[in-house]
Image (cartoon, rainbow, N blue to C red):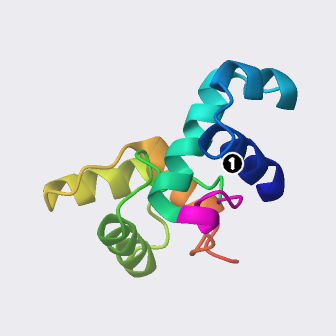
Amino acid sequence: MAEQRYEAVRAVIADGETVTDVAARFGVARKTVHQWLAKYEAGGLDGLADGSHRPRSCPHQMPAAVEVALVEVRLRHPSWGPRRLAFELSRRGLMVSESAAYRALVCGGGPTLSGTR
């Protein structure tokens, strides 16, 4: 895939072909060729390699400090459910919804709501 991108970039830069012609020949949009040119300019041949599609962040992910506090309270009070845990954390200034507390305990691999793993 990087070879195809390099060939397209080289066609525009070295051979002087238009972006429109190169895009048509390679079966991609003109915008894609412009992106390849920008990546090549920024990182050379390495810039054209396939990159990770993994997101850099997850904006709705629970902060680690809140998750740790949630698990600590849960370990001290195994009978408390998500509603009580969310209430206790809010008293400490850590805001977490009941549903987030539930998901963190059930899906997060920590002590589950039943108290066993």
**Residue at position x 25%, y 59% from top?**
89
Q: Residue furthest front?
A: 15
Depth order, front residue of 62/109: 62
- 33 horizontally vs 81: left or right: right
- Which image quadrant for residue 66? bottom left
- In the picture, the quarter occupied by the C terminus is bottom right
Residue 11 visible here: yes
**Residue at position x 27%, y 51% from top?**
87
Mark 1 secondary-structure assignment = helix
**Residue at position x 65%, y 24% from top?**
18
Q: Is residue 10 magenta?
A: no
Where is residue 5 drawn, in percent x and y? 74, 48
| Residue stretch in magenta | 44-51
- Which image quadrant for residue 27? top right
**Which amino acid does the dot numbered 1 rest on?**
Arg
Q: Residues within 10 Å of mark 1 (few under 14, many from 20)?
A: some
